[in-house]
């Protein structure tokens, strides 16, 4: 039986066009693959990846529906336990303020 949730860190990635989820976390949740997409990163170009149906829920903050799907990426094995990247598809509807002097940020959706 699939898990109902996976715990981990979520990184705000202003350089990511779309929101992404770790492939192993998506598989653990048994998220259905709705499509495939071609993506590029700083280290890879034109890679075909799965696009999962699902939503991103951050307890105490907000729930994000991602109608175009979550891009599947390999974040497995990172030391910070990052399981998702919030991209500009979500950030485009938000106000993000980063205070570098204090090392804090605020986001309003």
Image (cartoon, rainbow, N blue to C red):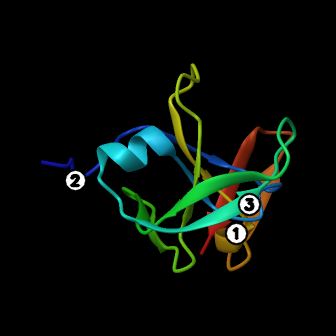
In the displayed structure image, the side of residue 79 where residue 18 appears, left or right = right
Residue 18 sits in quarter: bottom right
Query: Height in image: 53 above or below 7?
Result: below
Q: Nearer the viewer, mark 3 or mark 1?
A: 3
Marked residue nearer the N-terminal end (3 or 1): 3
Q: Residue at x 76, y 38 (%)?
A: 103
Residue 16 sits in quarter: bottom right
Pick the front one: 97 or 79: 79
The residue carrying pointer 3 sits among few (fewer than 14), some (14 to 19) or many (20 or more) residues within 10 Å by Cα, namely few
Marked residue nearer the N-terminal end (2 or 3): 2
Query: Which residue in the structure is indicated by mark 2?
Result: 4
Query: Which residue in the structure is indicated by mark 1?
Result: 91
Query: Which residue in the structure is indicated by mark 3?
Result: 38
The image shows residue 3 at horizontal and vertical percentages of 21, 47
Contact? badges 3 and 1 (CB < 8 Å): no
Secondary element under disc 2, as helix, strand or loop, is loop
């Amino acid at each position: 039986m699939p898990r109902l949730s996976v715990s981990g860190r979520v990184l705000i990635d202003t350089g990511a066009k779309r929101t992404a989820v770790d492939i192993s976390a998506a598989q653990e949740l048994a998220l259905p693959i709705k499509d495939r997409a071609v993506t590029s990163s700083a280290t890879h170009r034109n890679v075909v990846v799965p696009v999962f149906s699902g939503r991103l829920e951050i307890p105490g903050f907000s729930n994000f529906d991602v109608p175009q799907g979550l891009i599947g990426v390999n974040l497995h094995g990172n030391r910070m336990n990052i399981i998702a990247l919030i991209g500009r598809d979500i950030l485009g509807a938000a106000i993000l303020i980063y205070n570098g002097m204090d090392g804090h940020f605020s986001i309003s959706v």
